[in-house]
Image (cartoon, helix red, strand yellow):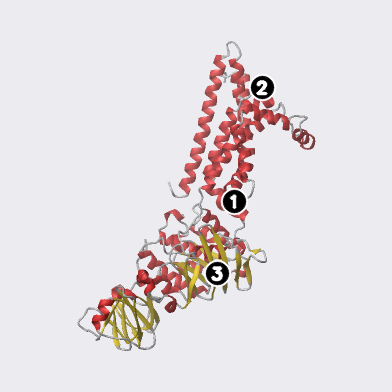
Amino acid sequence: MISVDVALARSDFTLDVAFEGGQGITALFGPSGCGKTTVIRLVAGLERPDRGRITLGDTVLTDVERGVRLPPHRRRIGLVFQDALLFPHLSVATNLAYGRFFTARERRRVERDAVIAVLGIGHLLDRRPATLSGGERQRVAIGRALLTSPDLLLMDEPLAALDDDRKLEILPFIEHLRDAFAIPILYVSHSVEEVARLAATVVRMDQGRVAAIGAPAEVLAPTGLASAMHRFEAVSVVTGTVAEIDEAYGVTTIAHPAGSIVVPGRLPRVGASVRVTVRATEVTLSRERGTATSVRTALAGRIEAVTTDGGPFALVTVLLDGGETLYAYVTRLGFDALGVAVGDRISALIKAVSIDERGLAGLEAPEKRKA
Amino acid sequence: MDWFTVEEWTAIGLSLKVGTIAMVASLPPAILVAWVLARGRFPGKALLDGIVHLPLVLPPVVTGYLLLLSFGRRAPIGAFLAEHFGLVFSFRWTGAALAAGVMGFPLMVRAIRLSMEAIDERIEQAAASLGAPPWWVFLSVTLPLSLRGVAAGAVLAFAKALGEFGATITFVSNIPGQTQTIPAAIYTYTQTPGGDLGALKLSLVAAVLALGALVVSELAVRRRRGREGRA
């Protein structure tokens, strides 16, 4: 378990954060400049805090008060940057082998062949980094870090430098390695879909401070109209099980107590539990089920709260049948025209095409996307 | 070959020897100093930078005189080295090599330092995160990635050593067969009636050697770039 409680002041920036991360993926989420990367650099030992303590399991990595500061190479923490930063003068195989020499034999629990298989980089071993595509490079970088059998893996925006297709290519690998190697991951991102899909715990950061910590569904929920400018980042996370895969139309139907959810793409298998990330701006409210539209997803629930401030927007909180919460950003005009109030039954319509595959946990690796 | 006299051959051979020894001997300290200046964070860094650059800005005669004051037979460092290691600099070819090395040192450090500073520091940090201690990061990442700078620095220092005149003649004089390198020989020819042809021939040799060094370093860099797949 990683435990961080540090503060640091620079001329143009102050950071003061405390959080803990357990197994699985802990996501550091927030706008650029909020200090996510600084936290990663502090944990990796590349930056010195002014005050505080960082521990990983029983190991004290940094303790300013006691003068402890383990150097980066003795922290046993893997690091994956936004740009892969492979060693350009070494082959892929040598890049992968680089850390092996420094990992004591009895600590080696990640197998080379397993990593190569999970990341699908077997055919690249003899190549030079300069000849790889962005996605391939990033996979090799992840493999290189994994092969030191680290106690923690730090991933700083590992997908940010890739185009959308490549992101979809890498995401399943990250999920797979999270499940296959049981190495806790501290994952930095400003993409709400990535965070909602991958994280067990989300640490939302703002201006060098922790704004919220918790499960994705809680932390990523809109906090009210104060953040109306950030309305495109407000999401709800709902969980269902795969009910039917429609090969002909290329869509998957997910069963949920409030109704079925249609999403694009083929999810791995019927019966699998799936997290779906829905942007609050993509939810339409309707008084009836409404079969006269192209929208296939209508979730039933009850209006729990409406937040307005006299501006153009209204944030509607819908308590779905089954207990999950769905948020909808609508105009105040639209909501008033509906003629409903808190406590009334309502249908929430979601366009399948508006659901970003990045926010759909459990999707299979897209086929034939090799560069 | 009888294009050159025995004295001229001696000067050419001595210049090559002095230049090569000066270059090879200054490479390790130059790489170390360049690394310290490129990556180190310590008080007194500006002072070190200044001292390294001193031979570049001082009149060569002054540098030669300072060498004489410290490495001469009866000077503190010179006497110590002579007594304990049998290493004598004054009026020997070794002294010419020392003078040439000192004069070329700032050029070498500068070229290596620039190429080290051009390396993304995060590549070295990635190596550290893989468990590599700093010395191994230096040997396996920093040094290979700055080889172009090392080659450029070596060539610059070699060329400087071939051309070095002021500090050498002040420190170890102009003794044929011992300290008379090509520039000193050319100087002697220009002071001798009828020495024009010799001066001209040796000047041509100096130009050819300098160009040759440049070509060799260019080839080394090209080959390396090819291997990294960037060509």
* Res A265 → quadrant: bottom left
* Res A336 → quadrant: bottom left
Q: Is residue A366 visible?
A: no
Label drawn at residue A152: 3
Q: Are marks 2 and 1 on the same chain?
A: yes
How many angstroms separate mark 3 from mark 1 (CA)? 26 Å
- A177 relative to A225 in the view: left or right: right
Label drawn at residue B174: 2
- A251 relative to A34 in the view: left or right: left
Q: Which residue is outermost to the top?
A: B193
- Residue sitting nearer the eye, B34 or A347: A347
Q: Pointer 1: what residue?
A: B139
Q: Nearer the viewer, mark 3 or mark 1?
A: 3
Q: For the residue carrying disc 3, how many other residues have a C-alpha within 10 Å: few (<14), some (14-19), or many (20+)?
A: many
- Residue sitting nearer the eye, B38 or A77: B38
State which chain disc 3 sits on.
A
Q: Are marks 2 and 3 on the same chain?
A: no
How many angstroms separate mark 2 from mark 3 (CA)? 66 Å
- Residue sitting nearer the eye, A360 or B50: B50
* Res A75 → quadrant: bottom right
Q: Earlier in the sequence, mark 2 or mark 1?
A: 1
Residue B104 percent location from the top left of the image: 60, 34
Secondary structure of the residue carrying tag 3 is: strand
Q: Amino acid at mark 1?
A: Leu
Q: Residue at x 80, y 35 (%)?
A: B83
Look at the image and tell me in which quarter the N terminus of chain B lies: top right
